[in-house]
């Protein structure tokens, strides 16, 4: 499946990379690697993730970082709606859907 980012989600992802890389370059690399692994896992089976908000928005938590990826499958695409810190500003991204 093709991964497509909402422009704000792409900016959030880049902000997270910058944040972790600034703290420690190894941490930044770890974040990128885990994020890419998460996208692969999501692509393998979108239905395994619970719907958290309609229309069909699902969530995956990274294991080593306090980040949630909010996404939905539309046809042959996975739309990344938000790359959000899981404890800050819940559902601020909901206007993007």
Image: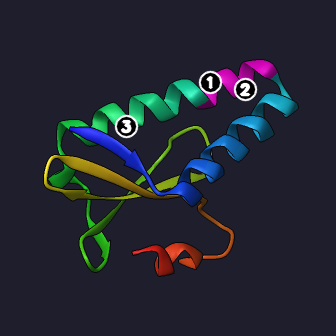
> Distance from label 1 to label 3 (Cα)?
14 Å
Outermost residue toward the front in this view: 7
Foreground mark, 1 or 3?
Answer: 3
Q: Quadrant of the C terminus?
A: bottom left
Q: Quadrant of the N terminus?
A: top left
Q: Which mark is residue 40?
A: none
Foreground mark, 2 or 3?
Answer: 3
* Residue tagged 3: 39
Instruction: Report helix, strand or loop for mark 3.
Output: helix
Using residue 12 as the reference point, say whether residue 93 is left or right of it: left
Q: Is residue 79 visible?
A: yes
> Distance from label 2 to label 3 (Cα)?
18 Å
In primary-sequence order, the first of circles 2 and 3 is: 2
Q: Position of residue 21 (x, y in %)?
A: 78, 29
Instruction: Report helix, strand or loop for mark 2.
Output: helix
Seen at 62% across and 24% down, the residue is: 30
Give the answer, above or below, for where 8 lies relative to 17: below
Q: Would you call the spot at circle 1 few (<14 residues within 10 Å), some (14-19), or many (20 or more)?
A: some
Using residue 10 as the reference point, say whether residue 76 is left or right of it: left
Q: Is residue 83 visible?
A: no
* Residue tagged 1: 30
* Residue tagged 2: 27
User: What colouring style does the render use?
Assistant: rainbow
In primary-sequence order, the first of circles 1 and 3 is: 1
Seen at 29% across and 35% down, the residue is: 41
Front-lying residue, 26 or 54: 54
Q: Which residues are magenta?
A: 25-31
Seen at 41% across and 28% down, the residue is: 37
Q: Would you call the spot at circle 2 few (<14 residues within 10 Å), some (14-19), or many (20 or more)?
A: some
CB atoms of marks 1 and 2 within 8 Å: yes
- Determine which quarter of the picture holds residue 25: top right
């Amino acid at each position: 499946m093709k991964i497509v980012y909402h422009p704000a989600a792409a900016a959030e992802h880049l902000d997270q990379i910058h944040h972790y890389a600034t703290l420690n370059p190894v941490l930044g690399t770890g974040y990128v690697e885990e994020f890419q692994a998460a996208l692969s896992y999501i692509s393998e089976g979108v239905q395994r993730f619970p719907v958290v908000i309609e229309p069909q928005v699902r969530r995956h938590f990274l294991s080593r970082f306090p980040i949630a990826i909010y996404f939905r499958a539309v046809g042959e695409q996975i739309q990344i709606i938000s790359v959000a810190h899981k404890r800050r500003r819940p559902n601020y991204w909901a206007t993007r859907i």
